[in-house]
Image: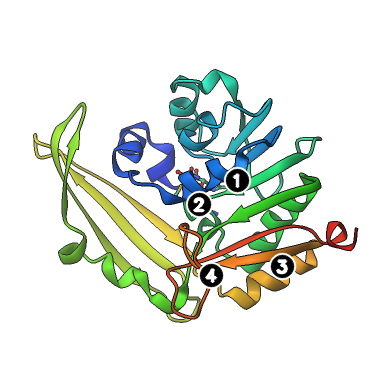
Amino acid sequence: MQEDRLYSDPALVDFYDVESTGRADFDHCRQLARGRRSVLDLGCGTGELAASLSGAAEIFGVDPAGAMLDVARRRLRGDAVTWVEGDARSVRLGRQFELVLLTGHAFQVFLTADDRRAVIQTIAAHLAPGGHFVFDTRNPAREEWREWTPERSRRTIEHPIHGLVTAWNGVERDPATGIVTYRTLYRLPDGVVLFADSQIAFPDREEIAQAIEGAGLAVERWMGDWNGGDWGLETLEIIPFGKRARDTLT
Ligand SMILES: C[S@@+](CC[C@H](N)C(=O)[O-])C[C@H]1O[C@@H](n2cnc3c(N)ncnc32)[C@H](O)[C@@H]1O
């Protein structure tokens, strides 16, 4: 897995929170976190979600991108979270959590089935008895990458430091692997263009279901969006919500 400058370059990370607005996933996860004593946010990014869960006694956020975690540490209530620079495929924190989250389509940065299985095993390794997990991935059937062309994605951003910035994307999909490579570009008022190339996968529900079962987890509900709608063939998202399989026997 190559380093993605969208998350590792502070100049690009500066755009993450500006572009990350109207997050129904965060709202849903905050509801799920109510009354839980411990929460783990894998692929926590700039930490907006984890820092907003400060009601729980123990909150951990894990991400390999130091520049994203720098934003997380500086944020209001960022000191209530234990931030760990780590890889969700292999990290082992030696503790279990009542809720394990992986949101904002962070699951899609894992490009191979082996990597996705490893991440789901990490979820299983950190799930406390009776605890729940949830993560999201875009439904490949919706082919959302088709929207990420320069024409369709062009937008103006009001950035707190730079002022008005023009942003757009470019996209390419490898038909053999289904991996989508997209470019994110920002033109600053002085004409400088910042950009990064990112790769994401679009696994289908069957593969995810098998990996979940193989990790000793069980899905209680497949959602199709973060407003709580059920999964269906044409829903935008694939969102498994579940727990340890052995908990379903008690
Ligand atoms: C689209 S962002 C989502 C961030 C955050 N969850 C949110 O919803 O705003 C994807 C995140 O996955 C992180 N990531 C990339 N590789 C990872 C890995 N191997 N383990 C954990 N997180 C990873 C990136 O650094 C980035 O912060």
Taking the spot 40% from the left edge, 47% from the top edge, the residue there is 23
Q: Please give the residue where the numbered disc 3 appears in the rendered image.
A: 211
- Mark 2 vs 1, N-terminal side: 2
Q: Which mark lies nearer to you, 4 or 3?
A: 4
- Residue type at numbered disc 4: Asp
Q: Does the residue tagged 1 have its C-beta within 8 Å of any atom of ligand 1?
A: no
Query: Horizontal placement of 21 versus 220: left or right?
Result: left
Q: Please give the residue where the numbered disc 4 appears in the rendered image.
A: 230
Point out residue 101 in the picture as x, y percentages from the top left corner: 61, 47
Residue 32 is tagged as 1
Q: Is residue 67 visible?
A: yes
Residue 24 is tagged as none
Q: CA distance from mark 2 to mark 3?
A: 23 Å
Which residue sits furthest left?
190
Query: Horizontal placement of 226 versus 173: left or right?
Result: right
Q: Are marks 4 and 1 in contact (CB under 8 Å)?
A: no
- Mark 2 vs 4, N-terminal side: 2
Q: Please give the residue where the numbered disc 2 appears in the rendered image.
A: 2
Q: Secondary structure at mark 3?
A: helix
Taking the spot 33% from the left edge, 43% from the top edge, the residue there is 21
- Is disc 1 surrounded by few (<14), some (14 to 19) or many (20+) residues within 10 Å? some
- Residue type at numbered disc 3: Ala
In which quadrant of the rendered view does residue 141 lie?
A: bottom left
Point out residue 135 in the picture as x, y percentages from the top left corner: 58, 56
Q: CA distance from mark 4 to mark 3?
A: 20 Å
- Is disc 4 surrounded by few (<14), some (14 to 19) or many (20+) residues within 10 Å? some
- Mark 4 vs 3, N-terminal side: 3
